[in-house]
Image (cartoon, rainbow, N blue to C red):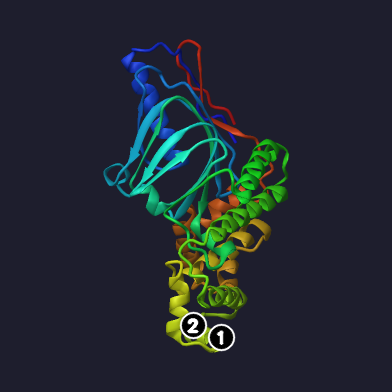
Amino acid sequence: MAITALYPIDRAAGRRGLLEEREELWTQTMRERLGPARIRLSRDDCGAGKVQSADLADLLLTDWDCPSFDGYVSRSVMKGEFDRDVVVVMAGYAGEERLSFNETDALLGPGALLIVNGDGLRRASFSVRHSLRKRTLVVPCSALRAAGGALAIPSALSLGPDRPLVNMFHTFLGQVWTGLPEMTAIEREAVRTALITLLAGIVQSEGTGVNDQSALPALRAQLDRSIAERLNDGPIRLEDLAAEHRVSTRTVHRAFELTGDTMKSVVRAQRVAAVRQDLLNTNLTIAAIAHRWNYYDASHLGREFRRVYGISAGEYRQHYAGDADASIRSTIDHSAHAAPQVMEAS
């Protein structure tokens, strides 16, 4: 990984050019690490701060040390830029941030956890009044669904530090951040799996949108397992799943509708997850992987993979398979020195 930008600029207030430059830098970093947003810095503070990133393959892990600012996301800001189906997790460590997602208001403070899906992010606003220290984790929804089975991912879920799993997540995320530079590729993959599993457990434990008195959640878990077992066997048909579990096709539809999914979307998510594992852990060609997981051809696999991960299967393998470099990348480092400069290092 590389230091992509280092801007040592003095903090003198009232310099319009400096303020605009810092606002643009924060806006750019927000777009790269979370999603497109407009940032307006406090006029009493030039916006000194620090942003560092340490990704785990397709999971974007970012450490934020933010000044006072206001920001918002809207359709006019996004303009198709936030098309990926993701969940954003925000863990608060110091200071406070007030956020609003559609009709949901939340306060991110020390020990709190905020989980927001892509729909919640499409119209959001946020405000930091003094300073803020937080970490964010961006996770593809397909990875969560593959790990969590019948998982209803909330538009916005705000959790306090009194929840045991929230405390566990904070502790584990801190250990990951500290230990990542020394981890091997195998260890980082294990950490990625553990983070996704723990996050899926947190969402499931909140019981979002699932009626515990219904038999459908149990059926949905069984259907997910059946799909995983059939991935190598050819096309997966709704009628076959219904017959296997002795229910009607309508009941199968209802089980998937619990979490806003369809059978096809779950099959796609599981196939792409299996492809990802082969890209990282085998030397099979893209064509061979496509055949193994019942895609029409390598082009079909490529389109589905890019839709989920935003890059091609070949690029994903090149970037992440056997990557031994686990150093933490500094995206922005604002300090109180003189003239601006940009540094790049590999």
Which residue is nearer to you in this view: 172 or 129?
A: 129
Compare marks 2 and 1 and give the one earlier in the sequence: 2
Give the secondary structure at mark 1. loop
Residue 272 seen from this side: yes
Question: Residue 321 at x, y = what percent?
Answer: 64, 51
Above/below status of 81 relative to 15:
below
As drawn, the residue found furthest toward the left would be 76
**Numbered badge on residue 245:** 1
Above/below status of 26 relative to 88:
above
Residue occupying image coordinates x 50% and y 76%? 214
From the viewer's perspective, is the residue at label 2 or at label 1 nearer?
A: 1
Q: Residues within 10 Å of mark 1 (few under 14, many from 20)?
A: few
Q: Which residue, given by chain and number where applicable, does mark 2 sit on?
A: 237
Q: What amino acid is at disc 2?
A: Arg
Give the secondary structure at mark 2. loop
Question: Residue 112 at x, y = what percent?
Answer: 54, 41
Marks 2 and 1, how far apart in space? Answer: 13 Å
**Numbered badge on residue 98:** none
Residue occupying image coordinates x 61% and y 58%? 279
